[in-house]
Image (tube, helix red, strand yellow):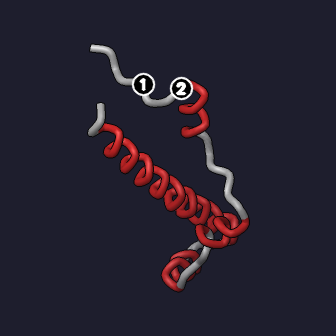
Amino acid sequence: MPTLQLLTESQQKNFDSCPTLTMKQRFRYFAINEAIVEYLDQMRNSINQVGPLVQLAYHLVISQLKNIVSIIINIFGQNL
């Protein structure tokens, strides 16, 4: 059974690539609350602190994109 192709190869490559954030989005996703500060304070130096911050921001962005995509697929999936 063939699979349904929702995106072209170029659209899929674009979807799978890292997002480009505006300055407003950078401030939103890289905001540091008290819980994050406490977690980062447990690390030895600033180099060790960068990785978790980037991972957190990346997962926040990706989780929003996946939620949006799943909503779109659910809407169009009903019409397939």
Q: Residue at x 34, y 21 (%)?
A: 3
Provide residue 43's location: percent of width, then percent of height: 58, 73
Report the side of 37 relative to 66 (left or right): right
Which residue is drawn at the image coordinates 59% and 67% (left, top)?
Answer: 29
Q: Is residue 57 left or right of residue 22?
A: left
**Residue 9 sits in quarter:** top right
The residue labelled by disc 2 is: 8
Image position, residue 21 (x, y; %): 67, 57
Expressed as whole percent of the image width and height from the top left, the position of residue 35 reads: 49, 81
Q: Which residue sits furthest bottom?
A: 34
Q: Which residue has dot 1 on it? A: 5
Please say if 40 is above or below 58.
below
**Farthest residue in the top direction?**
1
Which element is circle 1 on? loop
Mark 1 residue type:
Gln
In front here: 42 or 53?
Answer: 53
The percent position of residue 32, horizontal first and vertical second, equals: 59, 78
Callout 1 touching callout 2 (CB < 8 Å): yes
The C terminus: image quadrant: top left
Q: Residue at x 69, y 65 (%)?
A: 47
Left or right of 74? Residue 34 is: right
Q: Residues within 10 Å of mark 1 (few under 14, many from 20)?
A: few
At label 2, which amino acid type do we have?
Thr
Total residue callouts: 2
Residue at far right of view: 23
Work out how far the residue at label 1 is from the one at label 2, CA to CA, in angstroms. 7 Å
